[in-house]
Image (cartoon, helix red, strand yellow):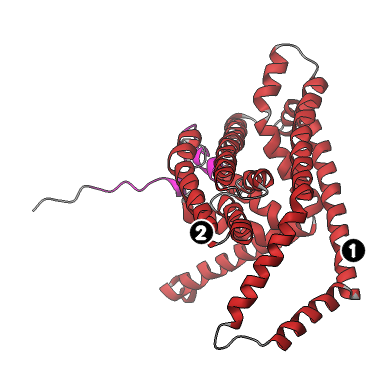
């Protein structure tokens, strides 16, 4: 027994516990990825249900049928998504011809610049690269990749349809579902479950409303800047920035980078540099003034944690995983914060009380 009670034995025991917990987490992540066709729509539905919770409470207070309130919420959500997609694709198709010509001119300018370098490829090598690219486009591999892309689109459509169905029932029968879940609980366990429910709804709802407001600010700011600089595809680029801004920190920057690339191809380096400046100014105002004012303490995660969970969410679930990583992590941390009381975190998360140092 002494073998396991000395310092090395205690360290080995703690290491075995850490490995066991890590194995459970890896197994859970593996199961979630294998069932992503269900888990991702369910997580999205929970986030949207929390965002629409005030609307559903208003309909219940005014004695509306629960199904009618849920249906109106779904119609609003799907209308916004459909209008955004139609507008983006319509604008791109309208201006794509001119932009393609500008892209070809930009490619030619880059080719001329490359040929001026001491290590530049010669004309024969450039022709070989172009020939290989055209050969790949006409090959069976490209066609199979295109079919795979069509399959991915069908998977996204199936997930979206499942999410809509789950969201409808969560909005319509959410209180009854929750009452059934907590029916076996009593006393302290019941109070804890209620605190968890309220905190999760507050975090999800606050995250959605504040992120939507910040994303709208980013989209409008980028749109105005692109209009002033006369960059083509200003409207679809602004909508793309709005959508990407739902991914914290990296989303709006990615949308701004795409806008800068379009400006570089269409108007030249000076326009691209000005677009980058506009993106920096808009993101600075949104990150330092608007988002802290809107979020308050709803989602209090350090920037380092946000970046880590976004990377992990992307690795597990792609773009949708990146979208869900921050609100799910914030909700989990919110649960820890109310575990032992309304403002009493779990024991391991409480700040240490330090005794004042003795004065000499």
Q: Is residue 220 visible?
A: yes
Q: Position of residue 261 (x, y in %)?
A: 61, 60
Q: Position of residue 58 (x, y in %)?
A: 68, 17
Going 75% across and 40% down the picture, which residue do you hit? 87
Chief SS of the magenta region? loop
- Residue 147's disc number: 1
Residue 351 is one of the magenta-drawn residues: yes
Foreground: 145 or 360? 145
Distance (Cα) linking label 1 and label 2? 40 Å
Residue on which disc 2 sits: 270
Q: Position of residue 281 (x, y in %)?
A: 46, 47
Q: Is residue 175 left or right of residue 248?
A: right
Q: Residue furthest left?
A: 360
Going 74% across and 40% down the picture, which residue do you hit? 84
Q: Is residue 174 left or right of residue 51?
A: right
Q: Is residue 123 above or below residue 327?
A: below
Helix, strand or loop at label 1? It is: helix
- Residue 269's disc number: none
Q: Is residue 147 left or right of residue 91?
A: right
Quarter of the image where one finds residue 111: bottom right
Foreground: 265 or 290? 265
Residue 87 is one of the magenta-drawn residues: no
Mark 1 and mark 2 lie on one chain; the one further toward the N terminus is 1
Q: Is residue 247 above or below residue 108?
A: above
Which residues fall within the magenta stretch? 333-355
Going 60% across and 29% down the picture, which residue do you hit? 187
Few, some or many C-alpha atoms within 10 Å of disc 2 (few <14, some 14-19, many ≥20)? few
Helix, strand or loop at label 2? It is: helix
Going 87% across and 53% down the picture, which residue do you hit? 154
């Amino acid at each position: 027994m002494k073998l396991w009670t000395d310092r090395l034995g205690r360290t080995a025991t703690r290491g075995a516990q850490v490995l066991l917990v890590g194995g459970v987490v890896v197994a859970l992540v593996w199961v979630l990825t294998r069932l992503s066709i269900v888990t991702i729509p369910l997580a999205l539905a929970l986030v949207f249900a929390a965002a629409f919770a005030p609307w559903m409470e208003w309909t219940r207070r005014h004695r509306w049928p629960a199904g009618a309130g849920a249906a109106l919420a779904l119609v609003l959500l799907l209308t916004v998504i459909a209008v955004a997609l139609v507008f983006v694709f319509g604008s791109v198709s309208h201006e794509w011809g001119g932009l393609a010509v500008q892209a070809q001119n930009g490619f030619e300018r880059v080719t001329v610049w490359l040929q001026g370098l001491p290590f530049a490829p010669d004309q024969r090598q450039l022709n070989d690269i172009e020939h290989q690219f055209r050969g790949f486009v006409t090959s069976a591999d490209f066609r199979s990749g295109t079919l795979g892309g069509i399959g991915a689109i069908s998977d996204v459509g199936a997930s979206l349809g499942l999410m809509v169905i789950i969201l409808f029932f969560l909005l319509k029968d959410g209180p009854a579902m929750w009452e059934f879940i907590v029916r076996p609980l009593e006393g302290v366990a019941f109070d804890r479950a209620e605190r968890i429910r309220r905190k999760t709804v507050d975090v999800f709802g606050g995250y959605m409303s504040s992120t939507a407001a910040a994303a709208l600010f980013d989209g409008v700011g980028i749109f105005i800047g692109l209009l002033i600089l006369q960059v083509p595809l200003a409207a679809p680029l602004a909508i793309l920035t709005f959508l990407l801004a739902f991914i914290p920190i990296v989303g709006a920057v990615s949308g701004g980078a795409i806008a800068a690339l379009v400006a570089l191809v269409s108007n030249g380096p000076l326009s691209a540099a000005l677009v980058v400046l506009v993106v920096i100014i808009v993101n600075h105002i949104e990150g330092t003034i608007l988002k802290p004012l809107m979020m308050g303490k709803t989602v209090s995660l350090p920037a380092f944690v946000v970046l880590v969970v976004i990377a992990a969410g992307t690795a597990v679930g792609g773009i949708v995983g990146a979208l869900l990583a921050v609100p799910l992590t914030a909700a989990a941390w919110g649960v820890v914060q109310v575990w032992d009381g309304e403002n009493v975190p779990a024991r391991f998360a409480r700040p240490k009380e330090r005794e004042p140092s003795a004065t000499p």
